[in-house]
Amino acid sequence: MKRIASQGSILEAGKQRHYLLKYGLGLNMDKQATYTIIAGCNNPFALFEPFKAFLELLKLFDVDYTFLKKEFCCGNLAYREIPREERPKLEEYSKQFIENNLKQARKLGSRAVVTFCNVCCFLYNRFFGSEYEGMRILYYPEFLLETMKGKPRLDKSVAYYEGCYRYQRDLAPGAKINLKSNHELLRRIQDLKVSQVPSNLCCMDSAQKIIDEVNNLRVNTLVTSCTGCFAVLDVISKLAGGKPEVKYITEILLEAYK
């Protein structure tokens, strides 16, 4: 908690994250903007290609956005390291850190905060619902639906794995996330043919079964919209020779605009 308070992230790479966003990727930081984007602690590193695709969509849709120079971690990784009986104290810190981000966004004049991280979105919703002092809190597919332009088209067959969200629901009971927005994003892509992989399978204990399900559907691409699922399934796929290829929903949407 001390590390989050001092540098924003529970990871040692808090400063490196800032340098990557501001100097490596040249992103807007602490700028007056309509949307404040919450990247998450690890996503710019662990999900670099999905995150980069998201950034390209921001430019493509001409979004008035900013990131925060000192974005505070939601505390996700700390939850994994403590006994359940110690969670109430951690939840107090977690709520405080999240509110720090929301207050920063308010000062920047943002009308909405957008969470790219799937764990962040559940915890933000648990503590503050869908709005904070008149400022909306959006799950990133909702945001993309709101800002997308034109008619994306991609003649391709893919399998879509929604994810079970077991871990997120355990951390944030009662959180209400618009998961239908993921499906609507895919429906907006003309000519895209989507088969569904059962979402009751969990990537934490059934990753190989998910990969097998996709291969049985005889498609070459697995699409997911959960940051955690992508990280796990991408590794499993690559260990198996890269079949199927694993793509994040932002990568598929960007491909449909090219």
Image (spheres, rainbow, N blue to C red):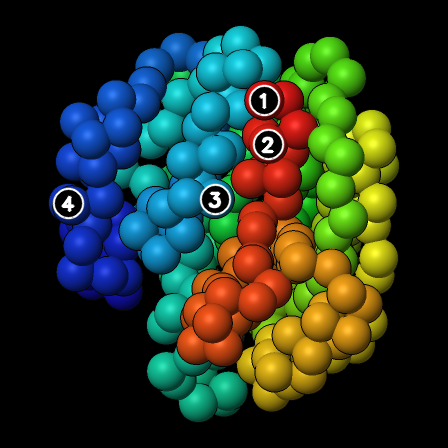
Give how far apart the Cα atoms at labels 3 and 2 are: 12 Å
User: Gap between marks 1 and 3, in whole Å?
Assistant: 16 Å
Q: Secondary structure at mark 1?
A: loop
Label 2 amino acid? Glu
Q: CA distance from mark 2 to mark 4?
A: 31 Å
Compute the Cα span from label 4 to label 1: 34 Å
C-alpha distance separating marks 3 and 4: 21 Å
Question: For the residue carrying disc 1, how many other residues have a C-alpha within 10 Å: few (<14), some (14-19), or many (20+)?
Answer: few
**Crowd class of label 4 (few under 14; some 14 to 19; many from 20; radius 10 Å):** some
Q: Does label 4 or label 1 sit earlier along the sequence?
A: 4
Kindly identify which residue carries mark 3.
50
Asked if the residue at tag 4 contacts the one at tag 2, i.e. Cβ–Cβ closer than 8 Å, the answer is: no
The disc, 2 or 4, on the residue closer to the chain's N-terminal end is 4
Which residue was labeled with disc 2? 255
* Residue in the picture at 77% in, 65% down: 218
Disc 4 target residue: 15
* Location of the C terminus (image quadrant): top right
Say which amino acid is labelled 1. Lys
Residue at 35% over, 56% down:
46
Secondary-structure class at tag 2? helix
Give the mark nearest the N terminus, 3 or 4: 4
- Report the amino acid beneath label 4: Lys
Left of 25 or right of it: where is 128?
right
Please give the residue where the numbered disc 1 appears in the rendered image.
258
